[in-house]
Image (tube, coloured by chain):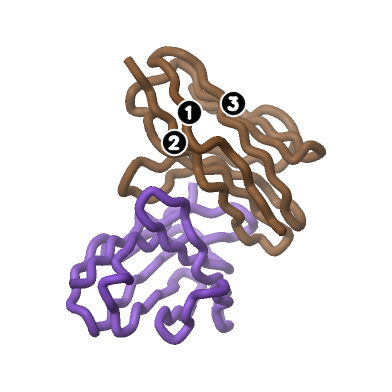
Chain colours: A purple, B brown
């Protein structure tokens, strides 16, 4: 199946700093990438949908100025958590889609101290 | 609105068979996914159904009825490692994934 990588897998940062998470589709070109956030014991929450070369579409309640998404190429999307706060600590997962079928990245665990 | 329903939790015995149901109401349909997720990990792909019928893959099978908005995931010969959450997700007409809340499956010896 499709292979999607995420980097870093785990990050710890101080409150107020910015963190960038990369999502790469390794063996296919992803026209669409999704960014999810997962809270403990809850299902995935879609944060935004990004299409290559255009602005991301954010879900209601997700601050686009805080969670910056850049889908610069068909194989790379980045999520930047700006001015991170402890409440941003979570598990962030990307998904890359092409032709209706895709796969998930392994996830990035963010801990903001 | 768009909605995916699946049971919150199920319990089964090692070696047995369990069926996890999923019903959906979405704007358009471009396929249904089943994912397995162990605690603290990203979901892993199990199956993809876009046509009606049963797809069998080893111990796992997935069934789809588009007219009924219904799918199930069937797990045979249950093993302790099958204890996980099972997520049903539907791709709508915009190819956006609509997620169910997941079914936590507990396997007992």
Viewer-side label of 2, 3: 2
- Give the vertical position of A27 relative to A53 (above or below): above
Q: Residue furthest right?
A: B67
Residues at marks 3 and 1 touching, judged by CB atoms closer than 8 Å: no
Look at the numbered disc 3 and give the secondary structure of its residue: strand
Q: Nearer the viewer, residue A36 or A25?
A: A36
A49 left or right, relative to B77: right
Task: Name the residue at 28% across, 82% down.
Answer: A18
Mark-to-mark CA distance, 2 and 1: 6 Å
Image spot of residue A78 (x, y percent):
40, 75
The chain under label 3 reads B
Residues at marks 2 and 1 touching, judged by CB atoms closer than 8 Å: yes
Label 1 neighbourhood size at 10 Å, few (<14), some (14-19), many (20+)? Answer: some
Label 2 neighbourhood size at 10 Å, few (<14), some (14-19), many (20+)? Answer: many
Look at the numbered disc 1 and give the secondary structure of its residue: strand
List the residue tagged with mark 1: B10
B13 left or right, relative to A28: left
Tell me, yes or no, whether dots 2 and 1 are on the same chain: yes
Q: Quadrant of the N terminus of chain B?
A: bottom right
Disc on the earlier residue, 2 or 1: 1
Image spot of residue A83 (x, y percent):
29, 84
Task: Name the residue at 46% across, 13% down.
Answer: B16
A87 left or right, relative to B58: left
Image spot of residue A89 (x, y percent):
29, 67
Examine the image and state in which quarter residue A56 appears. Answer: bottom right
Mark-to-mark CA distance, 3 and 1: 21 Å
Q: Quadrant of the C terminus of chain B?
A: top left
The chain under label 2 reads B
Label 3 neighbourhood size at 10 Å, few (<14), some (14-19), many (20+)? Answer: few
Q: Is residue B12 visible?
A: yes
List the residue tagged with mark 3: B56
């Amino acid at each position: 199946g499709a292979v999607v990588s995420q980097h870093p897998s785990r990050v710890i940062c101080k409150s107020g700093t910015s963190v960038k998470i990369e999502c790469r589709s390794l063996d296919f070109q992803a026209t669409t990438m999704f960014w999810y956030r997962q809270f403990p014991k809850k299902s995935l929450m879609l944060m935004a949908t990004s299409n290559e070369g255009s602005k991301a579409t954010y879900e209601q309640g997700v601050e686009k100025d805080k969670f910056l998404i850049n889908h610069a190429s068909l194989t790379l999307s980045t999520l930047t958590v700006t001015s991170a706060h402890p409440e941003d600590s979570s598990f962030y997962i990307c998904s890359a889609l092409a032709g209706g079928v895709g796969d998930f990245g392994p996830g990035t665990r963010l801990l903001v101290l | 609105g768009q909605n995916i329903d699946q049971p919150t939790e199920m319990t089964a015995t090692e070696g047995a068979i369990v069926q996890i149901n999923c019903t959906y109401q979405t704007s358009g349909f471009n396929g249904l996914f089943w994912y397995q997720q162990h605690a603290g990990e990203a979901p892993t792909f199990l199956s993809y159904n876009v046509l009606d019928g049963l797809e069998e893959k080893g111990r796992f099978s997935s069934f789809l009825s588009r007219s009924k908005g219904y799918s199930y995931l069937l797990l045979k010969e249950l093993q302790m490692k099958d204890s996980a959450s099972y997520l049903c997700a539907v791709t709508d007409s915009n190819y956006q994934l609509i997620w169910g809340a997941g079914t936590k499956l507990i396997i007992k010896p």
